[in-house]
Amino acid sequence: MQNRLKVAERLLFVLAAIITILAGLHDLGLWPF
């Protein structure tokens, strides 16, 4: 159970990082969406 929680936590962290990067690209005008 503890292991599954760690995996979910890591997935959330990666998802947040991807969203942050995409938002940054959008602000720079490199990402149209």
Image: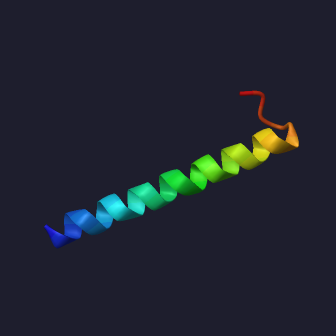
Count of marks, rendered view: 0
Q: Return the residue found at the far left.
A: 1
- Location of residue 15 in the rendering, given as x and y in whole percent from the top left corner: 49, 51
Residue, x 86% and y 44% (percent of image)?
28
Q: Position of residue 27 (x, y in %)?
A: 81, 43
Residue occupying the far top of the picture: 33
Taking the spot 77% from the left edge, 44% from the top edge, the residue there is 25
Q: How is the image coloured?
A: rainbow
Q: Position of residue 17 (x, y in %)?
A: 58, 57
Nearest the viewer among 16 and 4 is 16
Quadrant that contains the C terminus: top right
Residue 14 left/right relative to 31: left
The residue positioned farthest toward the right in the image shown: 29
Residue 30 sits in which quadrant? top right
Quadrant in the rendering for residue 5: bottom left
Q: Position of residue 21 (x, y in %)?
A: 68, 51
Left or right of residue 24: residue 10: left
Relative to 28, residue 13 above or below: below
Left or right for 4, reference 29: left
Q: Quadrant of residue 8?
A: bottom left
Residue displayed at 77% across by 34% down: 31
Give the vertical position of 25 relative to 7 (above or below).
above
Out of 11 and 20, give the one closest to the viewer.
20
Q: Quadrant of the N terminus?
A: bottom left
Q: Which residue does the image show at 36% across and 63% down from the upper left?
A: 9
